[in-house]
Image: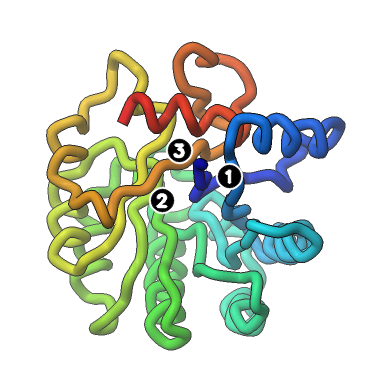
Amino acid sequence: EFFDSHCHLTDAAFRNDREAVLHRASEAGVTRFVCIASNVADADAARAFVSTRTGAWSTAGVHPHEAGTAEGDAVARIREMLQAPDVVAVGETGLDYHYDHSPRDVQRALFDAHLALGAECSMPVVVHAREADDDVAAALRNAPAGTLGVLHCFTGGDRAFAEAMARDWYVSFSGIASFRSFGAADLLREVPADRLLIETDSPYLAPVPHRGKRNEPAFVARVAEAV
């Protein structure tokens, strides 16, 4: 059996065949998944989607790409959503300095707020980190004591990795681990087995031999093989 720890099944890419995607996942032995939210509206949709299914959970948070357009009451609304029984984590949040879709100071402020929410609500925080190693490491280092979470879709970043390991965080690997260009194999080997997660990040980053196609939870078995 497989657990896809990070997928975006409310994404428009699955609009026309979502049930077929879920059927293929079941056929592939994927019995559980977490549907990750990208913003407040998506968190509402994800929570409604998983509420009628077994082995399914969701998150509530604002992706760094969406940070610049987040409403002023976003953190308060996320806090409220975290009380629902099917919502199991804060996020996806973090920093993305590759695309810079949102101003970096706004990304950092919202990331810190998510980390604080995780500590306040005793819930893990799902962290997206791209080309922002120093600032992600600093945010983890300055987060409230006891804050837990996962570096999702990890592809490298020695400083953030070290901070995560020092705080007993989890590290999750995606289909990128199957790419020839994957450069974090040495760090992957350092993750304790009980803190190692796999994910698809569907509909993105399909693993070999599906690279270039739409990703889906059924492919998490290929991620497991690569890891």
Which mark, residue 7? 1
**The C terminus lies in quadrant:** top left
Which residue is at a point 46% across and 55% down the rendered structure image? Answer: 103
Q: Quadrant of residue 55?
A: bottom right
Q: Nearer the viewer, residue 19 or 99?
A: 19
Task: Provide residue 70's location: percent of width, then percent of height.
Answer: 62, 65
Q: Nearer the viewer, mark 1 or mark 2?
A: 1
**167 in relation to 181, above or below:** below
Task: Provide residue 176's location: percent of width, then percent of height.
Answer: 38, 27
In the image, taking residue 57 as reference, residue 19 lies left or right, namely right
Q: Nearer the viewer, residue 140 or 177?
A: 177
In the image, taking residue 94 as reference, residue 80 lies left or right, namely right
Residue topped by disc 3: 99
Whether label 1 touches label 2, CB < 8 Å:
no
Q: CA distance from mark 3 to mark 2?
A: 13 Å
Residue topped by disc 2: 128
Amino acid on which disc 3 is placed: Tyr
- Whichever of callouts 3 and 2 sits on the residue coming sooner in the sequence is 3
Q: Nearer the viewer, mark 3 or mark 2?
A: 2
Could you classify mark 2 by the number of other residues whose Cα lies within 10 Å: few (under 14), some (14-19), or many (20 or more)? many
Whether label 3 touches label 1, CB < 8 Å:
no
Q: Quadrant of residue 126?
A: bottom left
Q: Secondary structure at mark 2?
A: strand
Amino acid on which disc 1 is placed: Cys
**176 in relation to 217, above or below:** above
Which residue is at a point 56% across and 31% down the rendered structure image? Answer: 204
